[in-house]
Image (cartoon, helix red, strand yellow):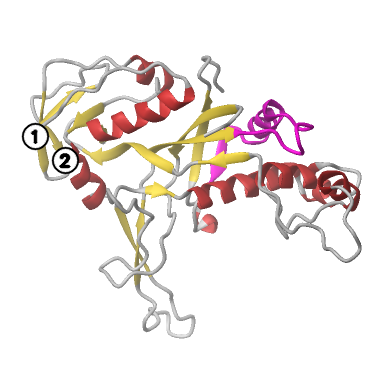
Amino acid sequence: MKHIESSLITLKAVSPIHAGSGSSTGAVDNPIQRERHTSWPMVQATSFKGALRAHCRSQLGAAALADPASNARNMINWVFGSDSSDYWDEGVKKATFGDIKEDRQWPENLAGAISVSDLKLLFFPVRSNIAPFVYVTSPAVLKRFFGDLTFLGFEVETVPNVKGECGYWINKDCGGDRVILEDAVITPNQEVIKIEIIRKRFAGLDRILIVSDDMYDYCVTSCTEIQTQIKIDPKTGTAQSGALRYEELLQADSVLYGVITYNHQVGETLKAKAIKDWLRENVQNYIQIGGDETLGRGICQIQWVEPQGGES
């Protein structure tokens, strides 16, 4: 795949995330998005890209977006692709698409200059006996993460094999001959696995435990947060009939990551590096993703990571 610039973005959930997959006939009425082949939690690229666009629109402000003299509205279209909510300035549209004959309409769609991946789960918090929670990951998760890092130009390390009810602490022995994860028991190996890129890029995370792929699958399938929601009838003060539902959430403290690549736009008038710098300038510190925004869901702390070692 051809691209000019790239970034790794990591997100740590400050509040639970509900990136919904629609209604379900199962026990949970509103489940979260999951990968088809693994059933691991994720946030689809469409949801993430929409959140980035909404965040940038909010960051730039309604006044700048409405001001004909401002280039904010056009920049949104160049970066994320044209959309009816961000109409083109006529002069910029002509400069972008060239002269159009009277019997033809302006192009309705312009592909954006960025390519956004799904947000993949890297570290999943699980209730434990040795601390309020332990972060779990698995060999399959780490191998996929390292594959994405290799694509971006990072140097990566080997991943240990973990079988059965064994486990390995990453970078620091957090103690305990037995670690209870919900109702599962893990016996950590005395050997601590040193993974330098995790030590550098996730320095604020403690208690990261590599478990087997099967154990990880159990944790992310059975240990997500389920909340009950009801609607109260204001006349009776009791729950309305049929208004009880169960919603699944990816709990706070979950850590996800995604890959963003950048290309030139408007021929090569708008360089990929300028687009990358613009996005990083407007997306800093925190972002909201997923649904239930008015309930405080989906607030995430973000960090940009560059192959050359720069980060913010």
Can you give x and y, in whole percent of width and height, for residue 247 in the image? 36, 62
The residue depicted at 69 percent of the width and 47 percent of the height is: 58
Would you name the residue on which mark 1 appears? 165
Name the amino acid, label 2.
Answer: Met
Sequence-wise first label, 1 or 2: 1
Q: Is residue 38 visible?
A: yes
User: Which is more toward the observer, 117 or 279?
Assistant: 117
Name the amino acid, label 1.
Answer: Glu
Residue stretch in magenta: 262-288
Can you give x and y, in whole percent of width and height, for residue 72 in the image? 79, 43
What is the secondary structure assignment of the residue under circle 2?
helix
Q: Are marks 1 and 2 in contact (CB under 8 Å)?
A: yes
For residue 105, which quarter of the picture?
Answer: bottom right
Tell me if residue 298 comes above or below residue 245 in the rendering.
Answer: above
Residue 283 colored in magenta in the image: yes
Q: Residues within 10 Å of mark 1 (few under 14, many from 20)?
A: some
Q: Residues within 10 Å of mark 2 (few under 14, many from 20)?
A: many
